[in-house]
Image: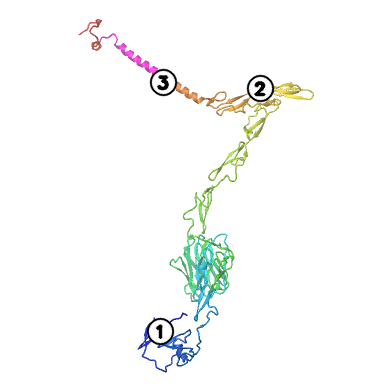
């Protein structure tokens, strides 16, 4: 180990005893004067090699029976004989084994006695720092998993393919030596017809695809004139993960039957014919993954794990910026520069269904997408869409509903979006050939010359003309022309106003009719057209209240009349009974009625003798 050790050897009869090492048996022997002691080797090289070779190192302070054996005696020593030295130097310099530096990967060498020690940098181990622990330095992107390999590492991850994805192109780096006899990968998709892996170098051909929902493996290789076909027994487009192994049954032969294993389910599918290996992929052959640029077969939509051909990965992260390149010799290089979407989920993202309000969930492998029904939006269809956001009501106010909206139109407009200008003149009441003019508040009547009023139903009153040589003033509607100093003015009749009395005052402008009554403008007055439940000049009387009072009054009168009739009937009955008994003789009645008569009251004799 390069360190100094103190050794003590005791020679006794039939055994040697070493300090801290115990003892060993030995034949009987003794040291005599004249014996020669050899240290570090024997004169006979062959015998020395048999015992492990010449000693290399430092020996000091050898004592034999307390007698010091000096290698370099001085003049004052008591040595009886000078030693014979062969390749022995004074001191203990040792060899500088750090030149050249035996430490790899930037390790720092420290020299020991005929040995060295390396101080290794991070992520390296071994006596000479020869083993690199690549994965400890995080050489892969966050979405990938680092997997140690002999003399290197691989970045393993699942890629997501969709309609926007393009094919991935790989080629050998030209250093692959091993025979390529198998393919392993995993996938999940819902496509019934899709390409997974394709490579072609005439006449050799490789294709892995899904046809009619089943996995199909096609291979023509080596000297075979036949194309091998293997089809899975089960459907594989159920959106679940499936693990696939395609391998030669006899990988050591030039031609062999092939076997397909899906999810390790038996029975395995085995080809009836034999073909060669996949070694043609080592010779600068284009390998397409997920799609191909040379046919019209639909590209993969789904997830694909890292494909391994002969144990060598087709890494999706080969060109990842800022990460360490793989150091191993045998590689398939990613030629295409398009990035790969990662993060494929292990199960259906729509289980359980995250979409609300009847939204349709679509598993897009790395996440999910909710197709929302009308009226709803958001990641989970959780937001009620504001149908009023686009201001659909042209001339009105919008009220939002669920998947609908309602427009409250301004006066004069109608239609779903208040886009139709109402023609208020369709049912106008303009009379006497007046012209109806529609506006947002209704319509107005443009009266001909001889008529006036809101509906032009009134004849214009006579007009008065007055003035002088410089002024000509006409007063309409019966207005009187008056002169005030040098100025002429019109004095209007009641119901008219204006500079020339040309305006009929609208007595309905103040909305005098109550309780929803319709005001009709007349000359110098108004008339209220009341509803059936109201009356009065301004519809101020509520007929319903009077009706209830009349009903109660009528009911009371009828009740009193009935009570009076009932009382009369009772009196009549009593009177009739009394008349029936008056003027007859009844001994029993006499006894009954006469019993309470006082003794001093004298009763008159009956008109008739009592007959016994």
Q: Position of residue 353 (x, y in %)?
A: 48, 53
**Which residue of the protein is positioned furthest toward the front in this rendering?**
76
Q: CA distance from mark 3 to mark 2?
A: 55 Å
- The stretch of residues the image draws in magenta is 563-585
Q: Quadrant of residue 506?
A: top right
Q: Which numbered disc, 2 or 1, marks the residue that appears first in the sequence?
A: 1
Q: Is residue 564 magenta?
A: yes
The circle on residue 524 is none
SS state under label 2: loop
Please give the residue where the numbered disc 3 appears in the rendered image. Answer: 559
Residue 546 in the image, given as x and y percentages of width and height: 49, 23
Q: Earlier in the sequence, mark 3 or mark 1?
A: 1
Queried whether the magenta region covers residue 338, the answer comes back as no
Tag of residue 494: 2
Q: Mark 3 vs mark 2: give the one in front.
A: 2
Q: Foreground residue, 526 or 447?
A: 526
Q: Which mark is in front, 2 or 1?
A: 1
Q: Any mark on residue 8, and which?
A: 1
Alpha carbon separation for disc pair 2 and 1: 151 Å
The crowding category of the residue bearing disc 1, from other C-alpha atoms within 10 Å (few below 14, some 14 to 19, many at least 20), is few
Q: Is residue 183 above or below residue 23?
A: above
450 with respect to 37 (left or right):
right
Few, some or many residues within 10 Å of mark 2 (<14, 14–19, 20+): some
């Amino acid at each position: 180990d390069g360190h100094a050790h103190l050794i003590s050897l005791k020679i006794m009869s039939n055994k040697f005893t070493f300090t801290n090492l115990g003892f060993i048996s030995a034949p009987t022997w003794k040291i005599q004067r004249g014996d020669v002691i050899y240290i570090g080797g024997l004169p006979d090289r062959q015998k020395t090699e048999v015992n492990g070779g010449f000693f290399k190192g430092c020996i000091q302070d050898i004592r034999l029976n307390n007698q010091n054996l000096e290698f370099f005696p001085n003049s004052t020593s008591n040595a009886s004989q000078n030693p014979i030295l062969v390749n022995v130097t004074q001191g203990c310099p040792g060899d500088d084994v750090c030149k050249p530096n035996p430490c790899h990967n930037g390790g720092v060498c420290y020299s020991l006695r005929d040995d060295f020690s390396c101080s290794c940098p991070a992520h390296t181990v071994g006596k000479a720092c020869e083993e690199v622990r690549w994965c400890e330095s995080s050489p892969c992107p966050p979405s990938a998993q680092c997997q140690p390999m002999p003399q290197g590492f691989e970045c393993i991850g699942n890629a997501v393919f969709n309609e926007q994805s393009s094919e991935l192109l790989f080629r050998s780096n030209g250093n692959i030596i091993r025979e390529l006899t198998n393919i392993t990968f995993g996938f999940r998709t819902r496509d019934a017809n899709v390409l997974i892996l394709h490579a072609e170098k005439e006449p050799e051909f490789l294709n892995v695809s899904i046809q009619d929902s089943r996995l199909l493996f096609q291979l023509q290789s080596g000297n075979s004139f036949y194309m091998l076909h293997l089809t899975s027994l089960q459907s594989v487009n159920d959106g679940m993960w499936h693990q696939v192994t395609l391998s030669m049954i006899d990988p050591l032969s030039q031609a062999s039957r092939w076997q397909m294993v899906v999810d390790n389910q038996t029975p395995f599918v085995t080809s009836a014919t034999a073909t060669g290996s996949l070694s043609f992929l080592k010779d600068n052959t284009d390998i397409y993954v997920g799609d191909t640029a040379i046919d019209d077969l639909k590209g993969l939509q789904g997830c694909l794990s890292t494909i391994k051909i002969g144990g060598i990965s087709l890494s999706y992260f080969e060109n990842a910026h800022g990460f360490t390149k793989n150091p191993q010799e045998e590689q398939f290089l990613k030629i295409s520069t398009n990035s790969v979407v990662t993060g494929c989920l292990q199960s259906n993202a729509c289980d359980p269904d995250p979409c609300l309000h009847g939204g349709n969930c679509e598993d897009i492998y790395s996440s999910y997408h909710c197709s929302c029904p009308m009226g709803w939006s958001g990641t989970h269809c959780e937001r009620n869409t504001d149908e009023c956001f686009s201001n659909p009501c042209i001339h009105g106010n919008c009220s939002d509903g669920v998947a609908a909206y309602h427009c409250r139109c301004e006066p004069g407009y109608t239609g779903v979006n208040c886009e139709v200008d109402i023609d208020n003149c369709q049912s106008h009441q303009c009379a006497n050939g007046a012209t109806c003019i529609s506006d947002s508040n209704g319509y107005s009547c443009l009266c001909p010359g001889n008529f006036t009023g809101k509906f032009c139903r009134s004849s214009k009153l006579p007009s008065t003309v007055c003035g002088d040589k410089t002024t000509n003033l006409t007063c309409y509607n019966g207005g009187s022309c008056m002169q005030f100093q040098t100025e002429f003015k019109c004095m209007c009749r009641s119901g008219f106003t204006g500079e020339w009395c040309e305006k009929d005052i609208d007595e309905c402008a103040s909305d005098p009719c109550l309780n929803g009554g319709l005001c009709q403008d007349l000359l110098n007055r108004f008339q209220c057209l009341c509803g059936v439940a109201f009356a009065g000049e301004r519809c101020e009387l509520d007929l319903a209240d009077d009706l209830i009072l009349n009903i109660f009054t009528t009911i009371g009168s009828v009740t009193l009349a009935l009570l009076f009739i009932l009382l009369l009937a009772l009196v009549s009955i009593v009177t009739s009974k009394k008349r029936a008994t008056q003027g007859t003789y009844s001994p029993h009645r006499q006894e009954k009625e006469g019993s309470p008569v006082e003794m001093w009251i004298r009763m008159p004799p009956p008109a008739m003798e009592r007959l016994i």
